[in-house]
Image: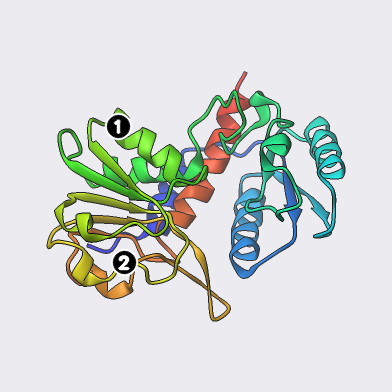
Amino acid sequence: MIIDGRKIAESVYVSLTPRPLSLGVFLAGGSPVTDSFVRIKAKAAERLGVTLVRAELPLDATTDVACATVRELAQRTDGVIVQLPLPERIDTDALLAEIPPHKDVDGISPQARVRPPVAAAVEEIIMCELVATRGRKAIVVGSGRLVGAPCTQLLRELGAEVQVLGKGDSLESLKDADVVVLGAGEPGLVRPEHIKDGVVLIDAGTSESNGKVAGDADPVCAEKASIFTPVPGGVGPIAVAMIFKNLFELTKK
């Protein structure tokens, strides 16, 4: 089954009552992947009555300037997103620490109060499709703060036996996995020969390939998987919907 992420995202949106809120988006540099997600966020914001406030810095901006910009953005908006990844010259940890916990809709600041949107999207897919996780072997490819780390925590909470594969690790163990979540950001990394028949394959790894957004899994993997999320159109739209669900939750009175 190929998951229609837009359909699941729609079910999230209809559960939210439009409110006059504001969402700040901090950007330092751009890419086709970043631009795609910002466009989707802008469209969703308009639908929900949320004003999107962009703060863009040049690639040569310092950490101090970036932190000051995020602080200012947080003061005048109801929620803040720092679009990752950032240029190497900027201290990501220092920047994320500037987001007030009650305005951190991405759930990645030190005292976050909501689940990160990608992990929330994965959870939504698991629940919607009644995927069995307790006692099952799950492998997460990648350990980043947006996908790998929060999805690893989620799967452990759901009772799975979780293994994490990092950059350069052998993919041989994927053949034994019942559930695989991809977040490496390497186009076409996982091919059909790496997975077993009937695996639940959730591709949350987005990157650029020939100027287009691509996933970590070769699309042909859908022929072996019992559940497969395409890129684009799979996890991404749901994750964006979860950003706004988090915003509404954090601003709930």
Task: Answer whether residue 248 is visible to the viewer in this image.
Answer: yes
Q: Is residue 227 left or right of residue 93?
A: left
Q: Earlier in the sequence, mark 2 or mark 1?
A: 1
Q: At 43% from the left edge and 64% from the top edge, which residue is drawn?
A: 233
Quadrant of image for the C terminus? top right
Most foreground residue, 198 or 190 = 190
Which residue is situated farthest in the left direction here?
A: 197
Q: At 57% from the left edge and 27% from the top edge, which residue is drawn?
A: 112
Q: Which residue is mark 2?
A: 190
Q: Residue 47, position in %: x, y?
A: 61, 51
Please determine whether, in this image, residue 33 is positioned above or below residue 97: below
Please determine whether, in this image, residue 104 is positioned above or below residue 43: above
Task: Answer whether residue 21 is visible to the viewer in this image.
Answer: no
Q: Residue 184, position in %: x, y?
A: 44, 57
Q: At 44% from the left edge and 59% from the top edge, which residue is drawn?
A: 205
Q: Could you tell me the amino acid type at mark 2?
A: Val
Residue 156: assigned label: 1
Distance Cα–Cα, label 2 vs label 1: 23 Å
Q: Is residue 122 left or right of residue 145?
A: left
Most foreground residue, 88 or 32 = 88
Residue 197: assigned label: none
Q: Residue 167, position in %: x, y?
A: 42, 56
Q: Could you tell me the amino acid type at mark 1?
A: Arg
